[in-house]
Amino acid sequence: MLRWLIGGSREPQGLAEYKKSALQTIGEEQTQNPYTELLVLKAHHDIVRFLVRLDDCRFASAGDDGLVVVWNAQTGEKLLELNGHTQKITAIITFPSLEACEEKNQLILTASADRTVILWNCDTGRQVQKVSCFQSTVKCLTVLQRLDVWLSGGNDLCVWNRKLDLLCKTSHLSDTGISALIEIPKNCVVAAVGKELIIFRLVAPIEGSLEWDILEVKRLLDHQDNILSLANINDLSFVTGSHVGELIIWDTLDWTMQACEHNFWDPFPQLDTQQEIKLCQKPNDISIHHLTWDEENVFVAVGRGLYVYNLQMKRVIACQKTAHDSRVLHIAKLPNRQLISCSEDGSVRIWELREKQQMAAEPVPTGFFNMWGFGRVNKQASQPVKKQQENATSCLLELIGDLIGHSSSVEMFLYFEDHGLVTCSADHLIILWKNGDRESGLRSLKLFQKLEENGDLYLAA
């Protein structure tokens, strides 16, 4: 897909450069993009918001029509259609079987705006159990596999067992409700409630007592606006991002801040065309809607842009301030230093993280993820840091693929190493993007096998 910026009058040089570099484009010959074939899957009749991986060859989709559909990721075949909710799905999660359990059924939990949660068997399509006692919509679900319980977050936090018995719950927390939940060490969970993070400790039954309990142990009040993203990085850290672009990395053991960043957007401050550049910005340009990670980096979707923060160096090492035309909704890191992003603009883009040697004359982005507690430093003290930044190896995000197939906002995607990429959208469709070379090879192999079975390979001899 080609995007052109055309103007009839001459613009200031700085603004022209800004527009030129605002959105990377790629021609029709996408030589590094493997996804050259696609299958369009139709089953939903409203926005498809969720995709969840069930195993190496199956996934489930869910959305605003209340349906849950199980698909074959290799062929695109619809395997099951799960009907039980009367309103839109608000959360979905897999519920793995116990290691000691002989019967390995694939179970999922779905929550809906109809104020119910259903436990499904994805092998049979059977509704195992349903809970209808909620006073508000459940916005998020999480499974604590070690304790074989699951938690639901809405206006309160509830703990349930595998039979869907309520074990314990908190009192009413907020009309805003819990928007995200993650597990951290010491039988604790972190709940995002508006601007606050609340740490809860789950108390399991001990000898002589069969009662479960959940205790609030701390509130973290450092965000200035609603928290949109919450994720574990590793055993030692978790990360949060807010609507106004605050990103904080936390210690999972003592819940203190390890790093903080507030200023992602800083376009050409020396130019006299600030007002013109401001007009190029769109609403929510600094909201952190989603993030992901690997062993080295945290990848952050900031408005329309993508940022890569290195955990060891404690700074941003690469960024694309305008990666899409609209807000980035979902990102994922692939094994081969590639990053995939999808957006409200209907596009799915593939990026490659490449190393480059930072030139001494090239300005290095500053202010990213400064260690919390660093105050202002004088000019002399900052010189060694500046010199170190100038000589540091930085990276760039290079666009290598642009997948145009959806006609509306792409909500999220799943990556299968063997079967390709699955995307879901507000256009009611799911698209299964296939590696063209791989699929061509598989077709040739199947044809060869069929000819061999029919004996046609030996006719010429």
Image (spheres, rainbow, N blue to C red):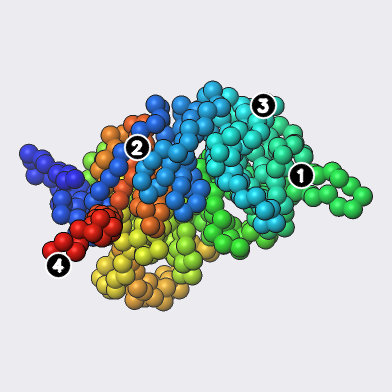
Residue located beneath label 1 in the image:
214
Q: Amino acid at mark 2?
A: Leu
Q: Amino acid at mark 4?
A: Ala
**Visible in this render: residue 232?**
yes
- N-term mark: 1 or 2: 2
Question: Between tags 3 and 1, which lies in front?
Answer: 3
2 or 4: tag closer to the N-terminus: 2
Q: CA distance from mark 1 to mark 2?
A: 42 Å
Q: CA distance from mark 3 to mark 4?
A: 70 Å
The quarter of the picture where residue 309 lies is: bottom left
Q: Secondary structure at mark 2?
A: strand
Q: Earlier in the sequence, mark 3 or mark 4?
A: 3
Q: Callout 2 environment at 10 Å: few (<14), some (14 to 19), or many (20+)?
A: some
The residue lying at 31 percent from left, 48 percent from top is: 433
Question: What is the quadrant of the N terminus in the image?
Answer: top left
- 3 is higher (above) or lower (below) than 419: above
Q: CA distance from mark 1 to mark 4?
A: 77 Å
Query: At 20% from the left edge and 47% from the top edge, which residue is drawn?
Result: 19
How busy is the neighbourhood of tag 4: few (under 14 within 10 Å), some, or many (20 plus)? few
Task: Point out which mark residue 41 bears.
Answer: 2
Structural distance between the alpha carbons of marks 2 and 3:
31 Å
Name the mark nearer the viewer: 1 or 4: 4
Q: Are marks 3 and 4 in contact (CB under 8 Å)?
A: no
Q: CA distance from mark 3 to mark 1?
A: 21 Å
Q: Amino acid at mark 3?
A: Ser
The residue tagged 3 is: 132
Label of residue 461 in the image: 4
Mark 2 or mark 3, earlier in chain: 2
Q: Are marks 2 and 4 in contact (CB under 8 Å)?
A: no
- Locate residue 170, reporting x and y percent: 74, 37
Task: Using the image as rendered, state which of residue 339 and residue 128 is in the foreground.
Answer: 128
